[in-house]
Image: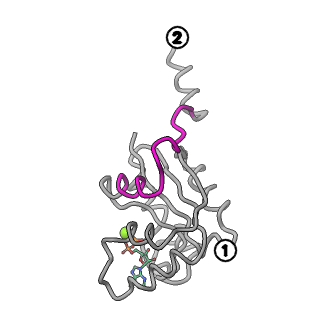
Protein backbone atom coordinates (compact mmCIF):
# COMPACT_ATOMS: atom_id res chain seq x y z
CA UNK A 1 0.00 0.00 0.00
CA UNK A 2 1.19 3.52 -0.80
CA UNK A 3 2.65 5.59 2.04
CA UNK A 4 3.30 9.24 2.63
CA UNK A 5 4.94 11.43 5.24
CA UNK A 6 2.68 14.02 6.85
CA UNK A 7 3.70 16.60 9.44
CA UNK A 8 1.50 18.90 11.47
CA UNK A 9 3.76 21.95 11.50
CA UNK A 10 4.76 24.00 14.59
CA UNK A 11 2.20 26.77 14.01
CA UNK A 12 -0.63 24.22 14.02
CA UNK A 13 0.70 22.46 17.13
CA UNK A 14 0.93 25.81 18.94
CA UNK A 15 -2.62 26.67 17.90
CA UNK A 16 -4.04 23.41 19.25
CA UNK A 17 -5.02 22.01 15.87
CA UNK A 18 -3.46 18.53 16.20
CA UNK A 19 -6.73 16.72 16.90
CA UNK A 20 -8.69 18.48 14.18
CA UNK A 21 -6.09 17.67 11.54
CA UNK A 22 -5.65 14.03 12.55
CA UNK A 23 -9.43 13.68 12.57
CA UNK A 24 -9.57 14.64 8.88
CA UNK A 25 -6.95 12.01 8.02
CA UNK A 26 -8.87 9.34 9.95
CA UNK A 27 -12.23 10.46 8.54
CA UNK A 28 -10.89 9.96 5.05
CA UNK A 29 -10.13 6.33 5.92
CA UNK A 30 -6.36 6.53 5.75
CA UNK A 31 -4.36 4.37 8.11
CA UNK A 32 -1.78 5.96 10.41
CA UNK A 33 1.14 3.54 10.77
CA UNK A 34 3.60 5.88 12.47
CA UNK A 35 3.20 8.93 14.66
CA UNK A 36 5.35 10.97 17.02
CA UNK A 37 5.81 14.45 18.35
CA UNK A 38 9.29 15.73 17.67
CA UNK A 39 11.00 19.10 17.89
CA UNK A 40 13.02 19.09 14.66
CA UNK A 41 16.71 19.81 15.09
CA UNK A 42 18.54 22.00 12.61
CA UNK A 43 20.04 18.85 11.07
CA UNK A 44 16.64 17.21 10.54
CA UNK A 45 15.11 20.42 9.16
CA UNK A 46 17.94 20.85 6.67
CA UNK A 47 17.59 17.25 5.51
CA UNK A 48 13.82 17.55 5.17
CA UNK A 49 13.94 20.76 3.13
CA UNK A 50 17.19 20.11 1.24
CA UNK A 51 15.45 20.75 -2.10
CA UNK A 52 14.77 24.36 -1.06
CA UNK A 53 18.33 25.20 -0.01
CA UNK A 54 19.42 28.44 -1.67
CA UNK A 55 15.90 29.80 -2.19
CA UNK A 56 15.15 33.21 -0.64
CA UNK A 57 12.65 31.77 1.84
CA UNK A 58 14.92 28.90 2.97
CA UNK A 59 16.36 30.55 6.13
CA UNK A 60 12.86 31.48 7.36
CA UNK A 61 11.56 28.02 6.50
CA UNK A 62 14.29 26.40 8.63
CA UNK A 63 13.60 28.85 11.47
CA UNK A 64 9.88 28.07 11.28
CA UNK A 65 10.14 24.29 11.19
CA UNK A 66 12.59 24.25 14.12
CA UNK A 67 10.51 26.75 16.15
CA UNK A 68 8.58 24.06 18.04
CA UNK A 69 7.39 20.49 17.94
CA UNK A 70 5.72 18.95 14.95
CA UNK A 71 3.55 15.83 14.82
CA UNK A 72 5.20 13.52 12.31
CA UNK A 73 3.14 10.77 10.73
CA UNK A 74 3.38 7.96 8.24
CA UNK A 75 0.02 7.56 6.55
CA UNK A 76 -1.03 4.67 4.36
CA UNK A 77 -3.80 4.31 1.79
CA UNK A 78 -4.70 3.97 -1.86
CA UNK A 79 -3.18 6.91 -3.77
CA UNK A 80 -2.52 8.50 -0.38
CA UNK A 81 0.15 10.91 -1.68
CA UNK A 82 -2.19 12.62 -4.13
CA UNK A 83 -5.10 12.32 -1.69
CA UNK A 84 -3.36 13.99 1.23
CA UNK A 85 -1.91 16.75 -1.00
CA UNK A 86 -5.45 17.42 -2.18
CA UNK A 87 -6.79 17.48 1.40
CA UNK A 88 -3.98 19.88 2.41
CA UNK A 89 -4.64 22.36 -0.38
CA UNK A 90 -2.08 24.42 -2.27
CA UNK A 91 0.89 26.05 -0.53
CA UNK A 92 -0.62 29.52 -0.08
CA UNK A 93 -3.64 29.22 2.25
CA UNK A 94 -5.50 32.19 0.80
CA UNK A 95 -5.56 30.63 -2.65
CA UNK A 96 -6.05 27.03 -1.46
CA UNK A 97 -9.39 25.46 -2.30
CA UNK A 98 -12.02 26.14 0.38
CA UNK A 99 -12.48 23.11 2.63
CA UNK A 100 -8.84 22.08 2.47
CA UNK A 101 -6.75 22.07 5.64
CA UNK A 102 -4.61 25.01 4.55
CA UNK A 103 -7.59 27.07 3.42
CA UNK A 104 -9.54 26.35 6.60
CA UNK A 105 -6.72 26.79 9.13
CA UNK A 106 -3.78 28.48 7.43
CA UNK A 107 -3.05 32.17 7.28
CA UNK A 108 0.28 32.72 5.58
CA UNK A 109 2.39 30.99 2.97
CA UNK A 110 5.18 30.75 5.56
CA UNK A 111 3.01 29.12 8.23
CA UNK A 112 0.72 26.83 6.34
CA UNK A 113 -0.14 24.27 9.01
CA UNK A 114 0.74 20.97 7.34
CA UNK A 115 3.34 19.19 5.23
CA UNK A 116 2.75 16.22 2.94
CA UNK A 117 5.18 14.45 0.60
CA UNK A 118 4.74 15.35 -3.06
CA UNK A 119 5.73 12.03 -4.70
CA UNK A 120 6.78 8.47 -3.87
CA UNK A 121 10.49 9.27 -3.88
CA UNK A 122 9.97 12.21 -1.47
CA UNK A 123 7.72 10.08 0.73
CA UNK A 124 10.32 7.36 1.12
CA UNK A 125 13.09 9.90 1.72
CA UNK A 126 11.10 11.91 4.28
CA UNK A 127 9.80 8.86 6.17
CA UNK A 128 13.42 7.71 6.58
CA UNK A 129 14.43 11.12 7.99
CA UNK A 130 11.84 10.99 10.77
CA UNK A 131 11.28 7.27 11.47
CA UNK A 132 13.38 4.18 12.02
CA UNK A 133 11.69 1.11 10.47
CA UNK A 134 11.00 -0.40 13.91
CA UNK A 135 9.06 2.71 14.93
CA UNK A 136 6.32 1.97 12.41
CA UNK A 137 3.27 -0.03 13.54
CA UNK A 138 2.44 -2.19 10.59
CA UNK A 139 0.98 -5.30 12.24
CA UNK A 140 -2.61 -4.16 12.70
CA UNK A 141 -5.71 -3.78 10.57
CA UNK A 142 -8.24 -1.01 10.41
CA UNK A 143 -11.89 -1.90 11.07
CA UNK A 144 -12.51 -1.48 7.34
CA UNK A 145 -9.79 -3.99 6.50
CA UNK A 146 -11.19 -6.46 9.09
CA UNK A 147 -14.75 -6.09 7.79
CA UNK A 148 -13.69 -6.56 4.16
CA UNK A 149 -11.64 -9.62 5.10
CA UNK A 150 -14.58 -11.18 6.97
CA UNK A 151 -16.97 -10.40 4.12
CA UNK A 152 -14.92 -12.25 1.55
CA UNK A 153 -13.81 -15.14 3.74
CA UNK A 154 -16.87 -17.39 3.26
P1 LIG B 1 4.48 22.51 -0.19
O1 LIG B 1 4.62 22.47 1.30
O2 LIG B 1 3.09 22.90 -0.62
O3 LIG B 1 4.99 21.27 -0.89
P2 LIG B 1 6.92 23.83 -1.09
O4 LIG B 1 7.03 24.68 -2.31
O5 LIG B 1 7.56 22.48 -1.12
O6 LIG B 1 5.37 23.74 -0.71
O7 LIG B 1 7.55 24.67 0.10
C1 LIG B 1 7.84 24.08 1.35
C2 LIG B 1 7.37 25.02 2.44
O8 LIG B 1 8.16 26.20 2.41
C3 LIG B 1 5.93 25.51 2.30
O9 LIG B 1 4.98 24.60 2.78
C4 LIG B 1 5.97 26.79 3.10
O10 LIG B 1 5.93 26.52 4.50
C5 LIG B 1 7.36 27.33 2.75
N1 LIG B 1 7.32 28.22 1.58
C6 LIG B 1 7.17 27.89 0.30
N2 LIG B 1 7.23 28.94 -0.53
C7 LIG B 1 7.47 30.00 0.27
C8 LIG B 1 7.64 31.40 0.00
O11 LIG B 1 7.62 31.88 -1.13
N3 LIG B 1 7.84 32.17 1.11
C9 LIG B 1 7.89 31.68 2.36
N4 LIG B 1 7.73 30.37 2.65
C10 LIG B 1 7.51 29.54 1.62
MG1 LIG C 1 6.94 20.49 -1.02
Q: Quadrant of ligand 1?
A: bottom left
Across and down, in percent, residue 46 comes to 39, 72
The picture quadrant where one finds residue 20 is: bottom right
Which residues are drawn in magenta?
123-141
Q: Which of 86 and 43 is in front in this view?
A: 43
The residue depicted at 55 percent of the width and 72 percent of the height is 113
Across and down, in percent, residue 117 comes to 39, 60
Across and down, in percent, residue 25 comes to 56, 53
Tell me if residue 130 is in the magenta stretch: yes
The label on residue 14 is 1
Q: Which of 45 and 94 is in front in this view?
A: 45
Distance of label 2 from label 1 (alpha carbons): 49 Å
From the viewer's perspective, is 3 left or right of 138? Answer: left
The residue depicted at 64 percent of the width and 69 percent of the height is 13
- Quarter of the rendering occupied by the N terminus: top left
From the viewer's perspective, is 53 left or right of 87? Answer: left
Sequence-wise, the earlier of marks 2 and 1 is 1
Q: In this view, does 30 lie above or below 138?
A: below
Q: Which of 131 and 115 is in front in this view?
A: 131
The label on residue 154 is 2
In this view, the mark in front (2 or 1): 1
As helix, strand or loop, the secondary structure at mark 1 comes to helix
The label on residue 62 is none
As helix, strand or loop, the secondary structure at mark 2 comes to loop
Q: Is residue 112 above or below residue 5?
A: below
Amino acid sequence: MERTFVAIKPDAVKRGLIGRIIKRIENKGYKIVGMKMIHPTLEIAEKHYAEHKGKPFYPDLIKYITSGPIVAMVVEGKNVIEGTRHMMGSTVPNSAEVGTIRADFGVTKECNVIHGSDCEVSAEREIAIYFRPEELCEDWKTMMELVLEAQFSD
